[in-house]
Amino acid sequence: MTISVKICGLSRPEDIRAAADAGARYVGFVHFAKSPRHVEVDRMAALAVEVPAGLAKVLLTVNADDALLDRITSRVPLDMLQLHGRETPARVAEVKARYGLPVMKAIGVAEAADLDAIDAYAPVADQLLIDAKPPKGADLPGGNGLAFDWRLLAGRKYWTRPWMLAGGLTPENVAEAVRLTGARQVDVSSGVESAPGVKDAGRIAAFGMALID
C-alpha cells in the first residue's frame, strides 16, 4: 500500500530537500503568526522556488481573508490551499472559486460527534484533513503534537473526498495509525522536529521509512 506523506511547517531549503528525499508528496508552508512554523510571504516565495517538480506546495492559513490570500497567491506559486481555522463550508467554496486551486479543509476531532462536520465540508472541499482537536484555549489549531483516538476512523471508507490523517503522528506511531484508520495520506509537522519549528532530517527520513511495506 502506497501512503502519500505531507511534511508541514517547513521553513528552510534543507527541510524541503529532506522531505523530497523521504518521498513526500506534499510540503506545507504555514502563514499564521502564532505558530513557531510561521513563514513570511517573501520567505515562502523563496522557499517555493526550491521545491522540486512533482512535490505539491500547500499553504496553511487560519481564518485568512481575501486580502491576505490575494497577497500570498500573487507572490507564491502554490498547488493547494489548506484552511485550518473556523472557515465555514460557504467560505471554503468561496476560496476555491476565487483562487482556482484545490482546497483542503482541516476538521478537528476529539470524539465521534466531531466527524459529523465531514458531511458539511465534503461537498465543497477537494480534500479533508482529519486532525486532533486542539485543547480549549490553545493558540494553535494544529501542530500541537496531539493525537486523537484513531479507532474513531476505523472502517470509514465511504467518505466522498480524499482525506489525510494528522495529529500527533511520529516515526514511531505512524504505521500503527495507518493500520487502525486505513488512511492513505498522512500529515506530520511537530513529529519530525528537534525543537518547535525546527525540522529534523533524520526524523523526516525515519517517518518515510516507517511507511514502507
Image: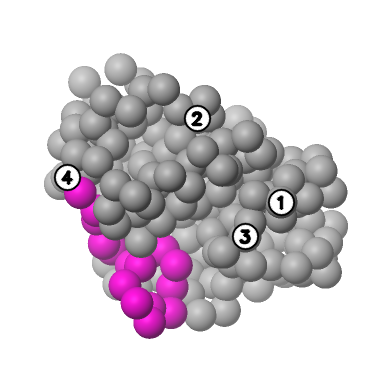
Residue at 73% from the left image edge and 46% from the top image edge: 93
Residue at 84% from the left image edge and 49% from the top image edge: 98
Left or right? Give the position of 18 relative to 66. Answer: left
Q: Residues within 10 Å of mark 1 (few under 14, many from 20)?
A: few
**Which range of residues does the magenta coloring cover?**
134-149
Overall secondary structure of the magenta section: loop
Identify the amino acid type marked 1: Ala
Instruction: Give the position of the C terminus as an image quadrant.
Output: top left
Which residue is identified by label 3? 87
Identify the amino acid type marked 3: Glu
Which residue is identified by label 2? 162
Which residue is identified by label 4? 173
Left or right? Give the position of 19 relative to 39. Answer: left
Q: In which quarter of the image is residue 38?
A: bottom right
Identify the amino acid type marked 2: Pro
Residue at 51% from the left image edge and 38% from the top image edge: 119
Q: Residue 31 in the image: x percent, y percent?
A: 60, 68
Do residues under tags 3 and 4 come within 8 Å of each other at their CB atoms?
A: no
* Label 1, label 2: how far apart the Cα atoms are: 19 Å
Q: Can residue 140 be seen in this view?
A: yes
Q: Is residue 17 visible?
A: no
Residue at 20% from the left image edge and 49% from the top image edge: 149
Q: Residues within 10 Å of mark 2 (few under 14, many from 20)?
A: some
In the displayed structure, 170 sits above or below 162; it is below
Q: Residues within 10 Å of mark 4 (few under 14, many from 20)?
A: few
- Is label 4 or label 1 in front? 1
Could you say whether the residue bearing mark 1 is in a helix, strand or loop? helix
Which residue is identified by label 1? 90
Which callout, 1 or 2, points at the residue further toward the start of the chain?
1
Task: Identify which residue, 149 or 44, lies in the foreground.
Answer: 149
Could you say whether the residue bearing mark 2 is in a helix, strand or loop? loop
